[in-house]
Amino acid sequence: MRIDEIVDIHKDIMTQCPFSDDNEELKVKREAFGAGPLKIWMQRLADCAEESGTDWIAGTEDITIADLVVWQLLTMIRTNDFSFIPGDYSDTWPKLVKLEQTVPAHAVVKAWQAHRASKQ
């Protein structure tokens, strides 16, 4: 159940994040998104991480799709793929920052990244 909840939050963020071809309009919409809905969803993700009792966001013994989608989201924010959402936006939630560091250190993720790098 917790994994589904986390994946649903990720889906909501990704599908409800505003877009616009007009940069000024995008700036206004994204800043409002960051101050409102995104902040609420990020807090919920942080709550999940806090409640998990493990290094993994869903409270599992090992990495799951929930950890991967949240890591992807955090990476997008950190690398400014969400224009007008500051790269350090997620620093407000230490448990999410910890997850952002834990996921890429997992052996499976390292192997996947090495495989991707070998194909480039």
Image: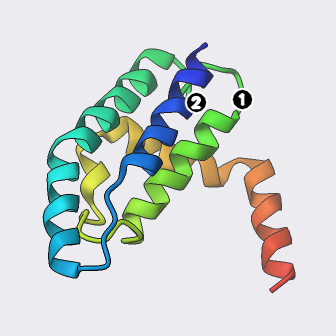
Q: Mark 1 Cα within 10 Å, few/some/many (few <14, many 20+)?
A: few
Q: Mark 2 Cα within 10 Å, few/some/many (few <14, many 20+)?
A: many
| Rendering coords of residue 35 (x, y %) | 15, 47
- 88 left or right, relative to 9: left
Amino acid type indicated by mark 1? Asp
- From the viewer's perspective, is residue 83 above or below residue 67? below
Badge 2 marks a residue whose secondary structure is: loop
| Rendering coords of residue 36 (x, y %) | 17, 41
**Residue 56 — which label?**
2
Looking at the rendered image, the quarter that the C terminus falls into is bottom right
Looking at this view, is 81 or 75 the one in front? 81
Q: Are marks 2 and 1 in contact (CB under 8 Å)?
A: yes
- Quarter of the image for residue 24 reads bottom left
- Structural distance between the alpha carbons of marks 2 and 1: 7 Å
| Rendering coords of residue 70 (x, y %) | 52, 43
- 85 left or right, relative to 35: right
Q: Residue at x 55, y 54 (%)?
A: 72
- From the viewer's perspective, is residue 3 above or below residue 110? above
Which residue is denoted by mark 1 in the rendering?
62
**Residue 84 — which label?**
none
- 105 left or right, relative to 25: right
Q: Residue at x 29, y 40 (%)?
A: 93
Amino acid type indicated by mark 2? Trp
- From the viewer's perspective, is residue 94 above or below residue 56? below
